[in-house]
Image (cartoon, rainbow, N blue to C red):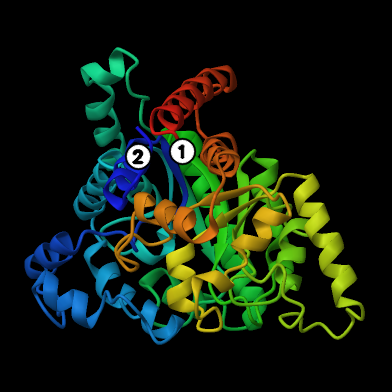
Amino acid sequence: MPISNQTQLREFITKLPKADLHVHLDGSVRIETLIDLSKQHNLLLPSYTVAGLNELVFKDEYKDLVEYLTGFGYVLPVMQTPEDLERISYEFALDNINEGVYYTEVKFAPQLHINEKQDFAEILIAVNKGLERAKNEFNKKDAVKSGKLPEFHYGIIVCTMRFFAQGFSKYYDDFLAAHKGLNQNAVFALASAEMVKACVKVRDEHNIPIVACDLVGAEAGNPPIHFKKAYHFAKQNLMHSIVHAGEAYGAESIYQAVTELDAERLGHGTMLFSEDGIKDPSIKNKAQFLQKLIQYIAERRITIEVCLTSNLQTLPHIKDIANHSFVEMLAAGLSTTICTDNRTFSKTSMTKELMLAIQHFDLSRHNLRRILIDSFAKSFMPINYLQKELYLTKIEALCDALINEYKY
């Protein structure tokens, strides 16, 4: 049954086993749930209809990253109780399961949800509870128990912020007030270290699958090197490391992520091939610097989490998907995964992102298969290593069967 039209392509991709390694929980709240919870808590929205919010907040196109981020001002207020976090997490998992995403590593910053009603532990317990409920419901189905479909698994990634200011959250307001004597970079670094310590404690005391820490937020002026203490503590406690790097800043950011923070995966990495993006005057031979950095990343199989739709919406310089550096990543043989970033903000899904990649980058059978398998193989799946190997064998078999069935 060779693929001959868009409908068949979508059917094929939906059936393929997928993993999403870069997706933000607060960027993936169902719009209907946002409306419902806003009404419950008497929160102001620019519209209380799905169509209205799609027009005013969650757009097809955004002017820039600033406009893209304004939506979080409406979403975060509905994520301030354990009950709401559990509901949102449960629905998030269901949305993934319903399109054939069998593994996801969902990320969020617990610090943005701390208030008088919930602390670090209560926040992470609530998110885990919602994800676990969806997992248990799906894994009890006959198709899963018979081996026809893979089990659903998940990991939680905690995000630390490169930058924060008054008004970000009650936690950050209190933190700033308590450390007035420190310079800004020292405050950000300290907050980062404290967050990682708190999450390691919750992970170990409550057996929650917190698999990695991630560094997020404005790259300019907030280089990865400032956060070495937090990442060293994470490594000492066997927590994996990811860094958002090269999204809107040059390759120096990526360089520090892999050399100073030992990042095992990179979020976005879109500027990896850009000589123009390099701002450090000490880098005289930009072409040579990039060549060595790309080789370093390739040889160590440091995986880049590619988010096509999100990059098109927030990085105006790309302009057209044909200009995305994903084509250069493929040519360099880098380990890449296709991810959603923010399902609601970008009106996307893993199916849509893979369709974009196939349609615009002419993915070969080999490249498609490698991307799909790497999404699972390069994950931090919180199960026994030998169990993960068996799971990967099942994923590979299902992937190959579908590729052969649809004659991709």
The N terminus: image quadrant = top left
Q: Is residue 333 above or below residue 38?
A: above
The residue located at (86%, 69%) in the rendering is 289
Which residue was labeled with disc 1? 408
**Badge 1: few (under 14), some or many (20 or more) residues near its Cα, within 10 Å?**
some
Circle 2: element type: helix
Q: Disc 2 or disc 1, which is closer to the eye?
A: 1
Which residue was labeled with disc 2? 12
Kindly identify which numbered label has been placed on residue 84. none
Q: Is residue 280 above or below residue 267?
A: below
User: Marks 1 and 2: in contact by CB < 8 Å?
Assistant: yes
Q: How far across and down, in percent of the image, does residue 170 sit?
A: 36, 72
Left or right, 274 with respect to 358, comes to right
Q: How far across and down, in percent of the image, does residue 334 sit?
A: 69, 50
Q: Amino acid at mark 1?
A: Tyr
Q: Considering depth in this image, is 327 or 174 the residue closer to the camera?
A: 327
Q: Considering depth in this image, is 346 or 3 the residue closer to the camera?
A: 3
Q: Amino acid at mark 2?
A: Phe
Q: How far across and down, in percent of the image, does residue 403 sit?
A: 45, 32
Q: How far across and down, in percent of the image, does residue 55 sit?
A: 20, 80
- Marks 2/1: CA–CA distance: 9 Å
